[in-house]
Amino acid sequence: MTSWDPGELRRIGDADELQLSSRRADGSLRPYVTIWVVRDGDALYVRSAYGSGNGWYRRARSSGAGRVRAAGVERDVTFADADPSTGAGLDRAYHGKYDRYGPRIVGSVVGPAVAGLTIRLDPA
């Protein structure tokens, strides 16, 4: 796994939203979707708020690679499985960053039901 540049990690991790695109079989990028991103240590994570059937999530899992952009950073990434032990820490990160949007919205990205829908973004 390649490490994030500290500046990129900080800028993306601090951004409210991230734009994510997965790669098609021919290598081209799909349209970007806007989602929340959290940082835990030296890693960045995203979760599917509406289950495993969410289109962006299925495409990211299937392709395994794509691109992200946020806060002036644009970077090719791979989509990796998150270590299950990160679940509680990521829940805290989501609460700390997004609770201002209310419990109904934040509730869609925290808890045991979505912990398995977590993708770690690794720089390619």
Image: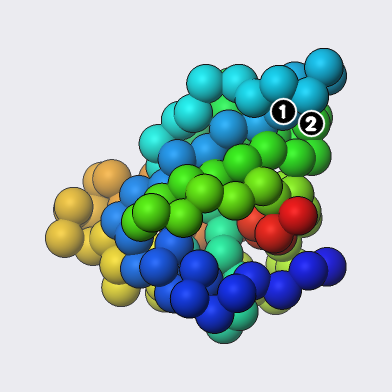
Residue at label 2?
A: 63
Q: Earlier in the sequence, mark 1 or mark 2?
A: 1
* Above/below status of 77 relative to 4: above
Query: Is 47 or 37 nearer to us in this picture?
Result: 37
Report the amino acid beneath label 2: Ser
The residue at the point 83 percent across, 68 percent down is 1
* Above/below status of 50 relative to 80: above
Q: Nearer the viewer, mark 1 or mark 2?
A: 1
Examine the rendering and report whether any part of residue 2 can be seen.
yes
Residue 27 in the figure: left or right of residue 32: right
Q: Residues within 10 Å of mark 2 (few under 14, many from 20)?
A: some
Q: Quadrant of the C terminus?
A: bottom right
Residue at label 1?
A: 23
Disc 1 and disc 2 in contact, CB within 8 angstroms: yes
Report the amino acid beneath label 1: Arg
Q: Quadrant of residue 71?
A: bottom left
Residue 86 in the figure: left or right of residue 95: right
Examine the rendering and report whether any part of residue 114 can be seen.
no
The colour scheme is rainbow
The residue at the point 40 percent across, 36 percent down is 34
Q: Secondary structure at mark 1?
A: loop
The residue at the point 60 percent across, 21 percent down is 30
The residue at the point 57 percent across, 64 percent down is 44
Q: Residues within 10 Å of mark 1 (few under 14, many from 20)?
A: many
**Residue 113 at x, y = what percent?**
57, 49
**Residue 79 at x, y = what percent?**
73, 48
